[in-house]
C-alpha cells in the first residue's frame, strides 16, 4: 500500500508525488463502472460492481487507498508499458504493480467467480 508522507505528499515506498491539490487527495474517491457486460440486468450489474468494489477496497486495505494506488500503477505503466518487465522496476514500483494486480484479480474473482472466461466484462475505474 502507498504510505504517504502527510506534509509532503510523497509515497514513502515509491517516491511518487500525490496528484496536485489539497491534502484531501490522500482520501481520493474513485468511480467504478462495469462495461462490456450487455447481457446483465441493472441489478446484476450493480451487484457485480458492489462485489468488485468491496474486494478491491479490502485487498488494498481501505477504499481511500484505491485511487492513490491506482494512480501510482497508471504512472508506472505509462513509463514502463502495459506489461512492465518487473526486473526493470524499482522495488517500490514492483510492489505497487504486484499489489494492484493482486487486488484487481481478487476483485474480478469476487465479482464474477473463479471460473470467468477470457472475454470477461471489464471495469473502468475513474479518478478525480
Image (cartoon, rainbow, N blue to C red):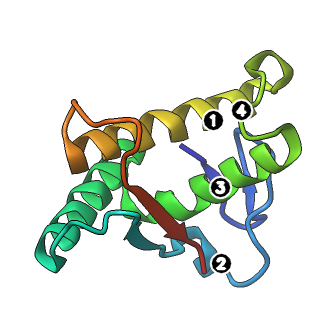
Q: Earlier in the sequence, mark 1 or mark 3?
A: 3
For marks 1 and 4, the one nearer the N-term is: 4
Query: How far, Cα to Cα, is label 4 from label 3?
Result: 26 Å
Q: Residues within 10 Å of mark 3 (few under 14, many from 20)?
A: some
Mark 1, mark 2: which one is toward the viewer?
Answer: 1
**Residue 12 point in image, percent of width and height:** 71, 44
The answer for how far apart the CA atoms under marks 2 and 4 are is: 31 Å
Spatial distance from mark 3 to mark 2, Cα to Cα? 10 Å
| Mark number displayed over residue 20 | none
Q: Residues within 10 Å of mark 1 (few under 14, many from 20)?
A: many
First of labels 1, 2 by sequence position: 2
Most distant residue in the front direction = 39
Q: Are marks 4 and 3 in contact (CB under 8 Å)?
A: no
Image quarter of the C terminus: bottom right
Name the front one of labels 1 and 4: 4
Quadrant position of residue 36: bottom left
Q: Give the residue pinned by disc 2.
A: 23
Q: Residue 84 occupies which quadrant of the picture?
A: top right
Q: Residue at point 77% right, 44% down? A: 76
Q: CA distance from mark 1 to mark 3?
A: 17 Å
Residue with the most extreme left position: 43
Q: Are marks 2 and 4 in contact (CB under 8 Å)?
A: no
Query: Going by the image, does 6 lie left or right of 16?
Result: left
Q: Nearer the viewer, residue 11 or 32?
A: 32
Q: Is residue 121 above or below residue 81?
A: below
Residue bearing the label numbered 1: 97
Residue at far top of view: 87
Q: Residue at x 32, y 36 (%)?
A: 117
Q: Which residue is mark 3?
A: 4
Secondary structure of residue under mark 1: helix
Q: Which residue is mark 4?
A: 83
Amino acid at each position: 500500500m502507498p504510505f504517504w508522507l502527510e506534509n509532503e505528499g510523497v509515497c514513502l515506498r515509491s517516491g511518487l508525488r500525490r496528484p496536485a491539490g489539497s491534502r484531501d487527495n490522500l482520501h481520493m474517491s474513485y468511480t467504478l463502472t462495469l462495461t462490456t457486460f450487455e447481457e446483465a440486468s441493472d441489478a446484476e450489474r450493480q451487484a457485480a460492481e458492489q462485489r468488485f468494489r468491496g474486494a478491491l477496497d479490502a485487498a488494498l486495505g481501505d477504499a481511500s487507498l484505491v485511487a492513490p494506488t491506482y494512480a501510482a500503477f497508471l504512472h508506472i505503466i505509462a513509463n514502463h508499458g502495459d506489461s512492465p518487465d518487473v526486473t526493470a522496476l524499482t522495488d517500490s514500483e514492483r510492489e505497487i504493480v504486484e499489489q494492484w494486480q493482486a487486488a484487481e484479480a481478487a476483485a474480478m474473482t469476487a465479482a464474477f467467480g473463479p471460473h470467468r472466461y477470457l472475454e470477461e466484462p471489464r471495469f473502468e475505474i475513474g479518478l478525480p
